[in-house]
Amino acid sequence: MSCVIAGGGPAGAVLALLLARAGVEVTLLEKHADFLRDFRGDTIHPSTLQVLDEIGLVGEFLKLPHHKAHGFGIVTDDGEVRVTDLRGLPGDYDYIAFVPQWDFLTLITSTAQRHPNFRLLMSAEATGLIREGDTVRGVRYRDGSGEHELRAELTVGADGRDSTLRAAARLVPREFGAPMDVLWFRLPRQEGDPEQPFLRLSSGHLMVAINRETYWQLAFVIPKGGFDRLAGQGIEALREPVARLLPFLRDRAGLIESYDDVSMLTVVLNRLRRWHRPGFLAIGDASHAMSPVFGVGINLAVQDAVAAANLLAGPLQAGMHVSEQVLHRIQRRRMPPTVVTQAAQRFVQNRLIGPALDSRQGTPRLPRDLARVPLINRVTRRFIGLGVRPEHVTAPAREPT
C-alpha cells in the first residue's frame, strides 16, 4: 500500500482522489457509515471551484442542488452594510456555492472509485499508528468485524480537529482560543425572504443567515461556554432573539421546538507547529482547526490536499520513500496561508464578534458600503474568494482502466 488516509472529509477525500487519478494505490478510511451529517461546512469558494474545474468535475458539481452568492453583507440595527462583491474576481468563478457537504464528498469519493487503485472503507475508524522505530508504517483501525492493521508507505491524518492520529504522532496544536460558540439550526424559507447570506449584528447578539433555497441555515452565536446558561432559560431564550433579529422569520421561530433541534459547534482555533513525522503527515483540520469566520474551512482543507498531492504523487507512484524533506515542503507551502487566514479570523473575533456579544460595549460602527471602496473590495474579495495562496493541480492524471 502506497498511502492510507484517515478521514473522509474535504481534505482526505480530495487528496485521495488526486492521488488515485495519478496512479497511486490509496485507501481512504471514514469512521462513519455515510457522509450525512448536518451543519458541516457547506461553502465552496471560487478557489475550490477552480480546482474542480482543473480535474474536470465542475460540471458535475454544478448539477448538485446549490445556491450561488456573489456577495456578503452585514445587517445592523441601523441598516445594511455591503461587505464585499465577488464579481470581478479573476477566473471563471465569482461566487460562493452553498452545497450540502455530503453531496460534495459523495461526488469526490464516487469519482475516486472509478480508479481501481482506490479503496474506500466506510465505518472504519483509525485508532492508532503502526511504528517501526521512529517511522510510521501504517494505521490501526476498527470496523464492524474487529481490529485491523493497514501498512503503507505514507499515512495521512485528515481525521479532523480532534485527530486521533495527530495525538498518536505526539503532535500538539497551539491553541488561540475564541470568544464564541455557535448554535446551528434551520427554519423554512418562504417567497419574499432575502436572497443573499448575511450577518445580523446587534448589541449582545450575532446571527448568520444562509439561504439554502428551501430553508434557512442559521447560526446563533453565543459567548464561549454559554450553552448551558442559555438552555437553562428554556427554548424561548433562543426563539425571542431570533424573531427580534430576523423579523421576516418571526412567524417561524416557534418551529424551534426544543434544543434538540439545535446543533452546537464548539469553536476552536489552533494549528500545529509541526505537521509531520517520518512516514506521517497531518492536513486539514488535523493540522489547523479554523474558526467559522469567513467560512473558509473547506477551502483551506482542499488547498492543503492539492498542495500535498502535487508533491506526493510523483514519489508515491514511483514507489519511492517519501522523505521528511518532502513532507516539510508541504507544511512550508501551506503554513503561510494558514497563519494569515487565522490572523484575520482572530482580528474579526476580537474586534467584532467579542464586542458584539458584550451588550455593554454596543455595536461597532461600520461604513455603509465597503464594497464601493475599490482597494478594500479587491483585497476582501480575493481573500474570501481565492485565499492567500490558491493552489492549482499539477499532479499527473491517468485515465481509469
Image: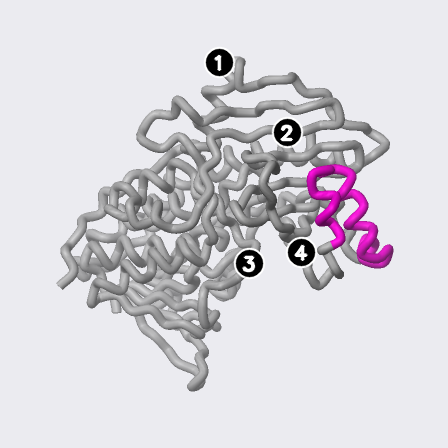
Residue marked by disc 4: 264
Q: Is residue 18 left or right of residue 202?
A: left
Q: Find out whether residue 145 is within the magenta segment.
A: no
Residue flagged by tag 1: what amino acid is it?
Answer: Pro
Q: Find out whether residue 230 is within the magenta segment.
A: yes
Residue flagged by tag 3: what amino acid is it?
Answer: Asp
**Sequence-first tag of 1 and 2:** 2
- Residue 331, placed above or below residue 266: above
Residue drawn at the location 76% of the way across and 43% of the way down = 243
**Sequence-first tag of 2 and 3:** 3
Residue flagged by tag 4: what amino acid is it?
Answer: Met
Crowd tier of the residue under label 1, counting other residues whose Cα lies within 10 Å: few below 14, some 14–19, many 20 or above: few
Residue marked by disc 2: 74
Assign a secondary structure to mark 1.
helix
Quarter location, residue 136: bottom left
Q: Is residue 271 visible?
A: no
Residue flagged by tag 2: what amino acid is it?
Answer: Ile
Marks 2,3: beta carbons within 8 A? no
Query: Which numbered dot is residue 385?
Result: none
Residue marked by disc 1: 374
Q: Is residue 238 left or right of residue 14?
A: right
Residue 72: % across, % down: 55, 30
